[in-house]
Amino acid sequence: MNNAVIKVEKSGLSTSIQDLGRMGYQQYGMVVSGAMDPFALQVGNLLVGNERNAAGIEAVIMGPKLVFLKDTVIAICGADLSPQLDGKDIPMWKSFFVQKGQSLSFGQPKKGVYTYIAVAGGIDTPVVMGSRSTYVKAGIGGVNGRFLQKDDMLHSSDVKEKIRLRRLPDNLIPIYQSDQKIRVILGPDRDAFSQRTVETFLTGTYEITKQTDRMGMRLNGPKIQHVSKADIISDSIFLGTIQVPANGQPIILLADRQTTGGYTRIATVISVDVARVAQNLPGGKLQFEEISVQEAQALHIKQEKILRQLAVGARIY
């Protein structure tokens, strides 16, 4: 049975298939990858009745043009890239029906960088090491391990239940590119920096450079001095880790980050703020604020409750 649901008419910029990542393989040198904005992907999936980890389409700044080959339900969450269905503006953070033959396109990017197109049944590509996420540098996951191209055919799993159309309440929709500070937990290499240097980091304004991609985001701002040296014995790298190499300019590591690193780590962006970092364009400005592990955990639990509540009643059985 042919389950093709979408034909790619135009590929857009670095459009790929992503889920929540390739967990459990960092010890073998395989990166996690996955959605740059995990919250937006999960919300999109829940709005169309999928499991939270289902694969969706990640579009970057310039979205693709997609033609639907069968009736389905979709939701678009994340950056506002001016989505249109058959040339008419459509809402975000809401599920809606699309009919066979209709086309989804994107216009002028308004807010954010990464948007997610969730499709009922999820995007069905081969599972590699427990994930469908595309990791282009290794050529695995997604569609032949690459960004989408014109005439690619995307498939979904069958959906037998009727989908209840839903939306995310306005007060829960993330605000991208805001003036709010990015919250961090200091360390784990806190001792590599003096208190004065840490204060420089927490009070300074850092500009996002053009050396930014799915692997990480290089910043430029007040120089961060090391107590002795920038290098450490290679150690674990996490989503949101902020490394400081010898030039004193921080690097925030993101979805396609390496598994280990040899630069001192001054702080880690808390999980609920990673998306707010990733959704900024080069030239954007970031400031940081220290919070406790307990505060970060409470914020994570709050976001988890939102997702769990959204998961209730997504389908009519």
Image: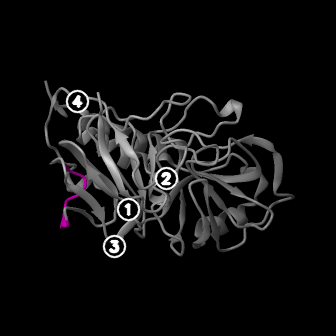
Q: Nearer the viewer, residue 35 or 308?
A: 35
Q: Which residue is mark 3?
A: 108
- Helix, strand or loop under label 1: loop
| Pointer 1 or 4: first along the chain | 1
* Residue drawn at 22 percent across, 49 percent down: 168
Q: Which residue is mark 2?
A: 274
The residue type indicated by label 4 comes to: Val
Residue 136 placement (x, y as % from top left): 58, 48
- How packed mark 1 is, by other alpha carbons closer than 10 Å (few <14, some 14-19, many 20 or more), is many
The residue type indicated by label 3 comes to: Gln
Q: Are marks 3 and 4 in contact (CB under 8 Å)?
A: no
Q: Nearer the viewer, residue 83 or 230?
A: 83
Q: Are marks 1 and 4 in contact (CB under 8 Å)?
A: no
Residue 281 placement (x, y as % from top left): 49, 69
- How packed mark 3 is, by other alpha carbons closer than 10 Å (few <14, some 14-19, many 20 or more), is few
| Pointer 4 or 2: first along the chain | 4
Residue at the limit of the structure toward the top, as seen here: 317
| Pointer 3 or 2: first along the chain | 3
- In the rendered view, tell whether residue 207 sits above or below residue 279: below
Q: Which residue is mark 1?
A: 63
Q: Viewed as shown, does residue 186 lie left or right of 56?
A: right
| Pointer 3 or 4: first along the chain | 3
| Pointer 3 or 1: first along the chain | 1
Q: State which region is magenta.
A: 87-95
Give the alpha-carbon distance from disc 4 to disc 2, as whole Å: 32 Å
Give the alpha-carbon distance from disc 3 to disc 2, as whole Å: 24 Å
